[in-house]
Amino acid sequence: MRSLLRRLSLLFNREEATRDLEDEMALHRQLRAESLHRFGSADADAAAARRFGNAVQMTERSRDAWGFGGADAFWQDARYALRRLRQRPGFTASVVGILALGIGATTAMFSAVDAAMLRPLPFARPHELVTLNRLNIPFNPGNGREDNEQAFDITSAMAMRDLFSSVAAYASGGLNLDDPERPRRLTAGVVSGAFFETIGVQAARGRAITPNDGMVNAPKVAVLSWSYWQEDFSDHEIIGTTIPLNGTAYEVVGIMPPGFSFPSGSDVWIPMSIPTTPATFQPFRGWLPSNIIARLAPGVSTDAAEARMREAWRRVVSTYPRQPGQKLSIDAQLEAVLTEGAAPPLRATLVSDRRSALLVLLATTGLLLLIACANVTNLLLSYGAARARELGVRSVLGATRPRLLRQLLAESVMLSVFGAVVGVAIAPVALRVLRTMMPAQLTGVAPVQLDLRVLAFATLLALVTGILFGLWPAFGATRGSTVSAIKAGGGHGASASGARRSQRILVAAEIALAGVLLVGAGLMLRSFERLVNTDSGISADAVATLELSFGGPGVRTPAGAVRNSRIQRLESILAELRRQPGVVAAGAVNDLPLRGGGGIGISVSVEGAPDSSKQYFPRYLVASDGYFETMGIQLRTGRLFAAGEPDENVAIVSKSMADIYWPNASPLGRTFLFGGDPPPLTVIGVVDDVREGGLERDPGPQMYLLAKRNLSANAAIVARSNGRTTDAALLAALRQAVRNVDPAQPVYNVRMMDQVVGASMAARKANTLLISLFGLLAILIAVLGVYAVAANAVAQRAREFGIRAALGATRGDLLRHVGGEMLLVVTGGVLAGATIAWAASRVMTGLVYGVTVHDVGVFATAPTVLVLAAVAATIVPARRAMRVEPVEVMREE
C-alpha cells in the first residue's frame, strides 16, 4: 500500500518529481566532478558526465521504475495522435463526420432495442412473469348467474398453485376527472386485486390495490401515479381523500413510485373484480380488453409452464361435446394458443410484432456503420500510403513496428471516440422518431433514452470501430522495407500499390452493403406509397375531431335515464357545433375510423343468410345523423340517417356486410338481430367500406346503429369546415361547442382527422423514414468512398498517366482507363449487393404492404441508382487524369 501511494503521488506530481530527479542527477555529477578535480583531472566535468552515463536514458529508466511507464506511453501516443489530427483538420472532420453518422444511428437504434428487448422490466424478477393467452375473465351480469363462454378461464389458472404463485389481470381505459374547474381525462389502469403483488411493485406512499379491493361490491379505491400526484395534488395530503371519476367517488389509498405507469402510461389504477360486473365495464363503452399475467412458481421454467398450459387447453377442448366433423369456437381458440403460445414471457407479449421491425432497423444501422468503417479504412489507407516515408524515417531512427502500430491505432481510436461523441450528441434527434415505433404496451415501462447503458454501448462501439478500421491501414503502413519506403517517397512504391488494391476491395464492399440498404429502402418506400394511396373510405380533409365520455352523476340513474341524458347532451353539442362559424357538417360516432382502438364484433342473426355468414362478427358502430356526410363516407344505395330520425330501429350497413349476408339481393328493407336481442333492425342504406384498425387491414363487415337508440358512454365528435376556416379555428369551435353545453365536460384527443390517419401509419412511416434515411446515407458514404479512391489513384499515378500521355494516349483513353477500373469495381459490388439483398429480403416480409419482398422494380432501380451515383463520383477524378501534362510530370520527377 505504501508503494502504491508513493507511485500515485509521483503520478499526480510528475513535474515536481522530474525536477527532483534532475536535481539529484545534477548533484551526483557535481560530486563526481569535485572528486575528480581533487585528484588532478584536467577536464573533471566532462569525465564526470562520461562516467555518469546517458542522462536521458537514466531519466527514462527512473520514470519506468515509478511504475507508470505504460500510462506514459499511452499519454504520449494520445498527444501525438491529437497533434497529427490537428495538422489535417479537413481529413479529421471528414472521418469524424462519417463515423458520427454510423455510431449515432447505431447508438440510437440500440437504445430502442435495449428498452424494448434487453433492459429488465421494472418489476421484481421479471423473468418469472408470463402472459396467459386467450384466457377469459368470467362475467357476472348481476342476475344470479355467471355468463362465461369458456370453461378454461383465469380462475382455472389461479387454481394451478403448483404452476403459478400468483395470477392477475389488467386492462387500460380512460376515466373522467369530474372537476368543474379543471375537467380532465385520465388514463386508467383497471387491475385485479393480485396485480401489484404479481408484478412485485409496491406503492411509494400508502398502499397498492390488494385482493380485498378486487372483491365484487368492495369499496371503491384508487391508486395514483407519482407524476399525476405531483401535478395535481402535491400541495396537500391526498391519501384518505376521495376523487370523483366518472361520477363515482374513489378513495385514494396509495401513490406508486416515480416512473411507474404500467399499463399504457396510467395516471390512476382502480380495481377489477373477478368475476367482472357491469360496473367494471360501464365507464369503458362496455368493452375492456384485458390481459392476464402470472408469476411462475419457484422452480418452474417458462418451457414447463408452456407445456402444462398447452396440455390443459387440449384437455379442456376435448371435453366439449360436438357432432362428427363439427368445429367449435373453442377449437379456434386452441389453434390460436398453439400458434401464439399458451404462456409466453411477458416481455415477448409487450414487444409483440414490433420485434421484427426493431431488429431489422438495428441490423440496418449495423450495415451503415460497416459502410462508414470501410470508408474510413479507405481514407486511412490513402493517408498511410502518403506517410510511408515518414514512417520509414521514424523506423530508421529506432521506432519499433509495435510502437508505430500503437501510434497509428491511437489515431484511429481517437477519431472513433470523437465520432462517438458527435454521434451521441445527434442521437436524440433519431430518438424522437424511434419513440413512435415503440409498442404501446411498453409506455410507462421501458422509455427510450440515452442512459448509462446506452452510453457504455457507445463507448464500447467507439473502441471496437476504432480498432476495426484502424488495424488494416496500420499493418499495411508498417509492412514492407523501410529503405524502399524512404526511396518511394510520395506513394509510388509497393505499399501504395497494395493500398490501392485494398481500397478497391473496400469500395466494392461499401457498394455491396449500400446496395442492400438501398433495396430495403426501396421496398419500404414502395410499400408506404401503396399504403398512402389506399382508399380509407373517408375524406379526412378539413375534418376535426375530439373525443369525450359522458360520465357524471347520470351514471347512477336507471339505464333508460342515463341513455336519455347522454342523447340530450350529444344532440345539444352537435346543434351548438353546427352553429359555429365555418362549420358545414357535424356528427358523432362511438369509434373513429383508423384510431386503432379495436372495437366490438357482434354476432348477427339474418334470416335466410348463407351458412358462411356465421363466421363473421360485424363491427358494431353507433352514429348520429350528419356523421356520414361529415366524414365523406359515400352512400351506395338507400339513404342515410336523417335529422330527427323517427324510427330508432334502423341500421346502415357497409358494402362488405351487404355482400356477406345478402349476396344476391338488395339489403334494403331487410331485417337482422344483433346479439340475439329484439327488436330487429331494418336496413335503410348501404355505404362504402371504411378501414377501421389501419390502412393495411382489409375492412370487415360493419353496421351503423342510430345513436338515439344505442348511444354508449363514449363518443367522438367530428366537424367539417367550409375549407376557408383554419385548422386551429375549427378545433377551437369544437372545444367551444362542448364548453357552451357543459363547461365541466372533459375532452381529449382534440385533433384533425389528417392527424388520426397519420397516427395510424406512424409506425410504418417511422420504419420507412429511418430505413430510407439510412439508405441515403449509405449511398452518400459509398459515393464518397468511390470518389476518394478514384482521386487518390489519380494523384498517386500521375507519373504513369503522364507517361501514357507522352506515348500517345488520348484524353479519352485516360478517361476510359480510370472510369473503366472504377466501373468494374462498382459493378462487382452492385452484383454482390443485389445477390445478398435478394437472399436477405425475406426478413422484411412483415414490414411491407402491397409489394413483394422481391419486387422487380426495386431490384432494378436500386443497382441503377448506385451505378449512376458511382459514375458521377468518378467523373471529377477522371477528368483530372485527362489534364495531366507529361512535361510537368517529368520535371517533377
Image: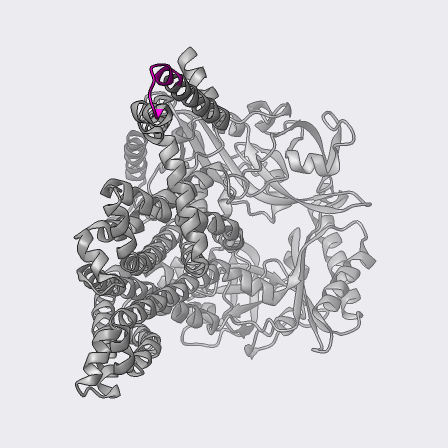
Could you tell whether 778 is left or right of 672 in the image?
left
Residue 46 occupies quadrant: top left
Whether residue 329 is visible here, answered yes or no, is: no
Highlighted range, magenta: 34-43
Q: Is residue 36 magenta?
A: yes
Q: Is residue 198 magenta?
A: no
In this view, the residue in front, 626 or 460, is 460
Please tell me which residue is depicted at 43% across the width and 19% down the height of the picture: 27
In this view, the residue in front, 818 or 5, is 5
In this view, the residue in front, 484 or 651, is 484
Instruction: Return the x and y of residue 659 as percentages of the image width and height.
Output: 43, 71
Please tell me which residue is depicted at 45% across the width and 16% down the height of the picture: 5
Query: Quadrant location of the N terminus?
Result: top left
Count of numbered circles on the image:
0
Instruction: Return the x and y of residue 885 as percentages of the image width and height.
Output: 29, 82
Instruction: Return the x and y of residue 356 as percentages of the image width and height.
Output: 36, 52
Could you tell whether 824 is left or right of 458 in the image?
left
Please tell me which residue is depicted at 34% across the width and 38% down the height of the picture: 342
In this view, the residue in front, 236 or 472, is 472
Query: Quadrant location of the C terminus?
Result: bottom left
Could you tell whether 223 is left or right of 395 in the image?
right
Colour scheme in use: one colour
Residue 35 occupies quadrant: top left
Could you tell whether 243 is left or right of 847 in the image?
right
Find the residue positioned furthest to the top: 2
Whether residue 59 is visible here, answered yes or no, is: yes
Instruction: Return the x and y of residue 754 as percentages of the image width and height.
Output: 59, 67
